[in-house]
Amino acid sequence: MCGRYTLTAELGELEARFDFEATDLQYTPSYNIAPSQPVLAVLGDGANRAGYLRWGLVPSWAKDPAIGSRMINARAETLADKPSFRQALRKRRCLILANGFYEWQRIGKTKQPMYISLQGHQPFAFAGLWEVWRDAAGTPLHTCTIVTTAANAVLQPIHERMPVILDPAAEAVWLDGSVTTPHDLLPLLQPYRAEDMQAYAVSTEVNAPRNNAPSCIAPIHPEVSEA
């Protein structure tokens, strides 16, 4: 799963990497992004456009937006079948921008937070789905979820699942509105290459979303950090 992540790159780097222009975008880097917060995403509709979605997907037919707190992740294996996700898979896909994410490894009776990223902490895109929900007055709420898949070799000692990090070559296909069939989309949702990733232990400071500083991703035992 993915329940906390980071986005710390400069805005100009993100614009160049994901081919969008930040017009009137109020961007603030974050070392501790949590569910229900606004997250930076890129949508494709001819030209890429970036904006904020609330993390925790609320289907358009939901009676209560509180359902979003239970829908921060969506399993790749069942996207095409579940009513909450199947239409979004076909029509409302996005890139959710990140530099890394946290997972908690059970060690005895404790849970050790781990930080996982690409080598060099370069930015990447989670595969995301988005929706628009409207209240009784018609006010829209734009929300999203992060797609997950089976863990790769880096994640397996930590957790059985991991977020889908799209290969850069797959990002354009994921955003292409003319691609609508699960047959063409689901093969993109694979575990990322383990050899290009790293994981290391970090402080329990990250356990509280109010803590949002570079110290959240500092290795607590740099000498044993794994590449």
Image: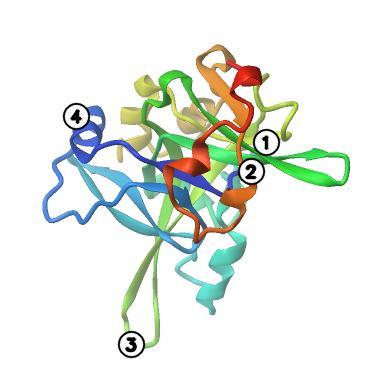
Residue where numbered disc 2 is placed: 1
Q: Amino acid at mark 2?
A: Met
Question: Could you tell me which quadrant the C terminus lies in?
Answer: top right
Q: CA distance from mark 2 to mark 3?
A: 34 Å
Mark 2 or 3: in front is 2
N-terminal-most mark, 2 or 3: 2
Counting residues from the start of the chain, the first of labels 1 and 4 encountered is 4
Residue bearing mark 3: 137
Structural crowding at the residue carrying mark 4, measured as other residues with C-alpha within 10 Å and reported as few (<14), some (14–19) or many (≥20): few
> Can you tell which mark lies on residue 186?
none
Find residue 16 and name its label.
4
Name the front one of labels 3 and 1.
1
- Above or below, 153 relative to 104: above
Q: What amino acid type is highlighted by mark number 3?
A: Ala
Between the C-alphas of marks 3 and 1, the distance is 39 Å
85 in relation to 218, above or below: below
Which element carries disc 4, helix, strand or loop? helix
- Look at the image and tell me whether residue 191 can be seen: no
- Given residues 226 and 39, the one toward you in this image is 226
Badge 1 element? strand
The residue wearing badge 1 is 161
